[in-house]
Amino acid sequence: MAEPPTPNERRKGADRRRGGFDARRPPKFGVGPLLVMFLTLVLLSMLWGGGQRSGRMGYSELKRRITDGQVERVSIGLTSITAVPRQAIRDSSGVKQWSASRIATEDASLIPLLDQQNIRYEFVEEGRLWSVLLWILPFGIIIAVWLMMMRRMNPTQGVLTVGKSRARIVGEEGTGVTFDDVAGVDEARQETQEIVEFLKSPEKFAKLGAKIPKGVLLVGPPGTGKTLLARAVAGEAGVTFFQLSGAEFVEMFVGVGAARVRDLFAQAKAQAPCIIFIDELDALGKARTPGGVLGGNDEREQTLNQLLVEMDGFDPRLAVIIMAATNRPEILDPALLRPGRFDRQILVDRPDVQGRLDILKIHSKGVSLGPDVQLERIARRTPGFVGADLANLLNEAALLAARRDKAEVSMQEIDDAVDRIVAGLEKKNRLINEKERTIVAYHEAGHAIVAERVPTADPVHKISIIPRGVAALGYTQQLPTEDRYLLTKQELMDRIAVLLGGRVAEEIVFNEISTGAGNDLERVTELARSMVMEYGMSRELGPVNLAGPRRMQFLGSDGDHGSQRQYSEETAREIDSEIRGLIDGTYERVRRILTDDREVLEVLARRLLEKEVVDEAELREVMNLPPRTREPSEERIVTPPPVNGVGVVGDGSRAASQGDETLLDGRGAHAAD
């Protein structure tokens, strides 16, 4: 009995079946050589008969030479007549033939003259090849253009393989990524460990009658490591890995996407056990709408239907695991998420403090760090950063160190890289007049003083009036002491107070307001509206949600509060009144704080005008506050667990992100726009 083929042999056979490279096969001609051959034939046909040296002359002159006996033979066509001179004339003049156009009327004396001179003559049908080519030429041009378009649309494969899968395949030798390369997502890694065990020893699960989930959907914000986690699963299991994007299925030709889905699953079944990973699933699996596009067939929906059929139809004993990643799970078709398809969803969320520290340890292995670099301090300063952000942070720091001709990356480069990522590039060459510069200094000083005076605000890390980014003329950066998942009403009110500090400072000092607080007021209004409409923090309206159901927001972006209003006009007026009351009350509170600290405001503003940047220690010195010392519990980087089962995407996280997204994620940049 013959032994079954090994996985490598099955993969090579599949490569040959789908048109992969095979050294035994002759190379295929592309569109270019075929087009060159066609144009060569056309050129030869145009030059047909012109390879001989010919002399054009009038009909009467040619007839005279025939009469003088200078012609050896004659070819008579429908429109022209060609005569071959005698050998002596050809040798002396070098002319191979004479040609002339025939006269419109028939010359009855030509044939008797040729018979009289004993000259051989013949009748020829001229132009047949050229007329045929002229008839074929338009069709040839159309076919050549079509082949060139198809080649450009599908450069890696031939025209006849447009329905083949474009998946990038990594064999059993592994992806080169293991769980040791994944950090900050411990819960997601534990969930995927079960898949690795199934792919390594499926008989253990089959013995107990257990069925592994067919599909695993990785959900989370961009940059958290969803693709890296999928590659790590394949690397740990040592199976073939098919990787492609959801957009690679969809084409302008109807039926191509469905054909690629069928081909992908056929290849996967031939190489089981394996993993199929579809990145950006929302490009393919968006919820279907009735009627398609303008009532016709929708190519994307046909592709999705084929994917649903394939996921529901293949044998689970084949050990083919389908993994997908998306950061927009709310728009996926419900049929994709039912049991039997993507029946397991794994949240790959932003890392906590310990997770960020682990990620920094991995990405710092190839970076020459100086002795003053403290990864714990960097992790504590970057809440809200994902793995891609942290990798970019260390890379930016290394670029700055190389630009400054340093042998190692110091903490100064790390701090500058954080500022560059958070607030943008410095615009030192931007010319700002002294009046505007003074307004910005008082504006940022107002933010900083209020942040230090209110009880629950995050401590100020740095104040700067150096222009950064596109429109930021200055910023106040706050550094949270720990990761936060929920915010109380008092904490939200304090955040509103910090945001209003810049505008109130301008009004107190200059008795006038500017446009610098535009972004602050936008965030204040949005946060107050969320408190009243969404979180039930209004004393008059009570614990009522008036914003309606919201979809899960991973990016902390604001939702649409008023798309479908479900309350009366009277309630709308009460909402406006409550929002105005929250903001006005906090405005007066901030005014009292800055009025009492007017002298500190003046000193801090002058310090900013002089030095442009004031750090935490200098700020507390100006405000006559003792240096801040962190408690040992904070130095251990302990992250509080979720409260009442609410995770990091719960109400508290959304409240903070709506009110002041930059404060929540530690980026704390208040800009005088």
Image: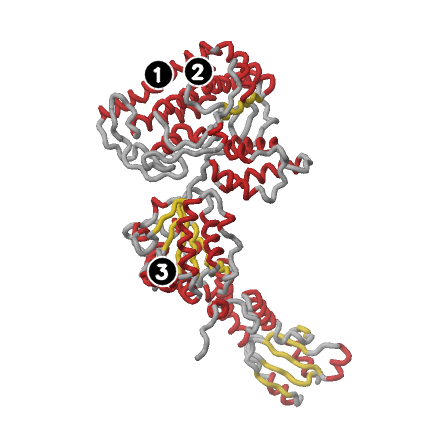
User: Horizontally, is 579 left or right of 28 in the view?
Assistant: left
Circle 1 residues within 10 Å: few <14, some 14–19, many ≥20:
few
**Residue occupied by mark 1:** 585
Please, what is the three-letter code of the amino acid marked with disc 1? Gly
What is the quadrant of the N terminus in the image? Answer: bottom left
Q: What residue is drawn where x is 42% and y is 64%?
A: 272
Q: Residue 111: x percent and y percent?
A: 60, 86
Q: Are marks 3 and 1 in contact (CB under 8 Å)?
A: no
Please, what is the three-letter code of the amino acid marked with disc 3? Phe
**Residue occupied by mark 3:** 205
Q: Residue 432: x percent and y percent?
A: 57, 21
Q: Nearer the viewer, residue 627 or 461?
A: 627
Q: Nearer the viewer, residue 438 or 15?
A: 15
Please, what is the three-letter code of the amino acid marked with disc 2? Val
Splitting the image into 4 quarters, where does residue 44 fall? bottom right
Q: CA distance from mark 3 to mark 1?
A: 63 Å
Q: Which mark, by number, is residue 504?
A: 2
Q: What residue is drawn where x is 41% and y is 15%?
A: 590
Asked whether the viewer can see residue 231, the reply is yes
Image: 47 above or below 644: below
Which of pointers 2 and 3 lies earlier in the amino acid sequence? 3
Q: Which mark, by number, is residue 186?
A: none
Q: Residue 587: x percent and y percent?
A: 38, 16
Which of pointers 1 and 2 lies earlier in the amino acid sequence? 2
Which of pointers 3 and 1 lies earlier in the amino acid sequence? 3
Q: CA distance from mark 2 to mark 3?
A: 66 Å
Q: Classify mark 3: helix, strand or loop.
A: helix
